[in-house]
Amino acid sequence: MTLRIVLVRHGLSSFNLEHRIQGRDDLSALTAEGQAQARSTGAALRDLRFDAAYTSPLRRAADTATQLLAEQGQGLSAQPSDDLLEIDLAPWSGLLRQEVRERFPEQERLWREAPETLELERPQGGSYNPLGELMLQAARFKARLLAEHAEGLAGADRTVVVVAHNAILRCLLLSLLDLPASGFRRLRADNCSVSVLNLSRTPEGSIAVQVESLNGTAHLGDPLPARGKGSRMVLVRHGETDWNRQGRFQGQIDIPLNANGRAQAQAAGRFLAPVRFHRAYTSSMARPRQTAEAILASHPGVPLTSTRGLVEIGHGLWEGRLEREISEGWPQLLADWKRAPETVQMPEGETIHDVWNRSLATWTTIARSLAEHETALVVAHDAVNKTILCALLGLTPADIWAIKQGNGGVTVIDYPNGPGTAPVVTAMNLTTHLGGVLDRTAAGAL
């Protein structure tokens, strides 16, 4: 049983357009473009049925929720919650970003480089930590969701939509993943972007969180969120194989794409056709190479490099077997793989730590080779992509099941301050080019 949480940031506001700090002041309103974004988002979510909707009471979010839900067509109204208010930046509210840089240079630097350490002065006196307070606020809203929708974790599946602001949505994501405030700058939430998380209860009684997608904006027109300065890497999982569809553990057996997988690769190619790639890299196996070649059909002249560092996890004696077959021969090891993958040594195969080390080393080498203006395509596998994304988000090898990678799914990583600095997971597992906001690709074995 699953509690699905759909997160939406409000549409473009007047203060967004003017590059002003909004905080939790209610002086900013949706622009005409922001209203259109809200309607487009509602249309993109028509296939979903929401059991509840929540919104920040600030009008730029509340108006987004109203227009989104009207377009979505279910007749639902959003419940306002003060725990969805935007971050409190009271001394800066209403100021242009340039004014903040000029008047508060050291504090503005901290906000960009280490926001969890920022202290501001309250108008009535005394200092406070804005991001620390927002993390507490996010934790309260998380607790409310779990309490009000407990049946989604124990009975019938439930889906809720949450419409709020940039900073509180990032903090809510961190809270759901049990990550600290220091991960704030690793995430991004664009105007009217859609992120999807799936929560379920484990046999031990804890809550497991899976990030299905992050910061999807294709429903607004452009396939990928806009890029700023710095290099960009576009990470894609290969298209479907027959063994994905059957649920076989394929690992390092070189299974090619099936007809659906070739169609997924071609769809990813059309989706990414507007992107300018300077280089491309693939696992040395057939299924990612075929996917990369389909994508690069729209990018003639881009060199494609194969590397062993990106090959799928070696499942050893499990390769080629269905899960029920593995359960018969290695019941405890399979249970451990599902519960605590970081503890498992595959019989005559690899550990997730082995994959983590080689995939991260390869990713880092590619990232550090890119010039500031360059964009690289990287096509690999489920476990490889998951280890890379766990590392970039601040998660561990124990957390690979918290990341979803659909066949043909597209992920975007930016390095706004240079390849040796902290990356931003700009978007993750975008699958709109394969049939909608939700990832409906095969849920087979690795």
Image (cartoon, rainbow, N blue to C red):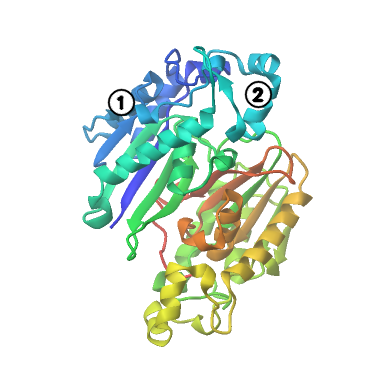
Q: Is residue 114 above or below residue 273?
A: above
Q: Is residue 27 above or below residue 377?
A: above
Q: Position of residue 410 (x, y in %)?
A: 54, 51
The front one of 264 and 41 is 41
Counting residues from the start of the chain, the first of labels 1 and 2 encountered is: 1
State the residue at coordinates (30%, 40%).
144
Q: Position of residue 224 (x, y in %)?
A: 55, 40
Q: Residues within 10 Å of mark 1 (few under 14, many from 20)?
A: many
Q: Position of residue 233 (x, y in %)?
A: 65, 48
Q: Tell me the CA gap for discs 1 and 2.
A: 36 Å
Q: Is residue 122 above or below residue 309?
A: above
Task: Please tell me whether mark 1 or mark 2 is closer to you in this view.
Answer: 2
Would you name the residue on which mark 1 appears?
66
The front one of 234 and 159 is 159
Q: Amino acid at mark 2?
A: Gln
Q: Amino acid at mark 1?
A: Thr
State the residue at coordinates (61%, 59%).
379
State the residue at coordinates (52%, 48%).
428
Q: Position of residue 40 (x, y in %)?
A: 39, 32
From the viewer's perspective, is 391 left or right of 29? right
State the residue at coordinates (54%, 79%).
346
Would you name the residue on which mark 2 appears?
107
- Can residue 351 be seen here? The reply is yes
As helix, strand or loop, the secondary structure at mark 1 comes to helix
Q: Is residue 43 above or below residue 393?
A: above
As helix, strand or loop, the secondary structure at mark 2 comes to helix
Which quadrant, please, contains the N terminus?
Answer: bottom left
Q: Residues within 10 Å of mark 2 (few under 14, many from 20)?
A: some
- Can residue 49 be seen here? The reply is no
